[in-house]
Amino acid sequence: MLDSIKFDDATIFQEQMSWLNAYAQKSDYKSIKEQCESDLKHSWGHDLNVLIISDRCPGRAIGLYEYLMEKTNLSSISQCRNFAEAKVCITHKPIDILIFVGFQKNNENYEIKKILEEKKPDIYTVMYASLDDCIKGHCVENKIQYAFSSRKPVAEFIDYLDNSYLDDLER
């Protein structure tokens, strides 16, 4: 009797979740792009180099990268999908600000923070994500002292970076 029944609900569920994730990433990207079109340019960022890492939120990460490129005066902005890419990136330029977009599927990505701390002990690291207890746990576990909700306007994130980066330097 069981031989005639298809046991494929898990496959269907995975396909639906994959579709939903792709939709969410497109929506995140579109939202940030729309903000970029309407927001004013920020004067913040002179002489600062940023590295963005995300292995699970490509829409949000790419949107943030493009927003920062267009709306700030940062010296350089790099975006990487994993530890290997980030490791190559940091050999070519100094990094002042490390941004994790969402918690990382691969915990190895957090190792880039340790490498950067060896070069620059006061590396400023921030989590840009949908803030919940899970994200708080990742921040505590990986000693990320700053976090900002990716559900808030990106312009507010820039203000947060500006203020908290200066506060961090004064410590």
Image: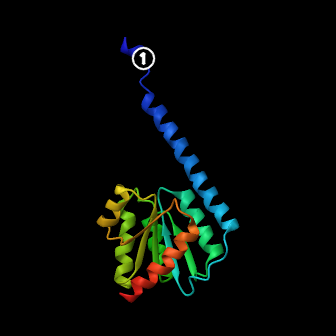
At a point 34% along the width and 75% down the height, the residue shown is 114
What amino acid is labelled 1 in the image?
Answer: Ile
At a point 37% along the width and 15% down the height, the residue shown is 2
Q: Residue furthest left?
A: 141
**Rendered view: 69 above or below 46:** above
How crowded pointer 1 is (Cα within 10 Å; few <14, some 14-19, many 20+) is rated as few
Q: Position of residue 83 (x, y in %)?
A: 42, 66
Q: Position of residue 109 (x, y in %)?
A: 40, 65
Find residue 70 and report its image quarter. bottom right
Q: How many marks?
A: 1
Q: Position of residue 89 (x, y in %)?
A: 49, 75
**Rendered view: 122 above or below 149:** below
Q: Residue furthest top?
A: 1
Given residues 64 and 42, the one toward you in this image is 42
At a point 69% along the width and 67% down the height, the residue shown is 38
**Rendered view: 16 above or below 145:** above
Quadrant where the C terminus lies? bottom left
**Residue 29 located left or right of residue 139:** right
Quadrant where the N terminus lies? top left
Secondary element under disc 1, as helix, strand or loop, is loop
Residue located beneath label 1 in the image = 5
Given residues 111 and 72, the one toward you in this image is 72
Given residues 152 and 58, the one toward you in this image is 152
Type of colouring: rainbow
Q: Position of residue 126 (x, y in %)?
A: 43, 71
**Residue 153 located left or right of residue 127:** right
**Rendered view: 13 above or below 38:** above
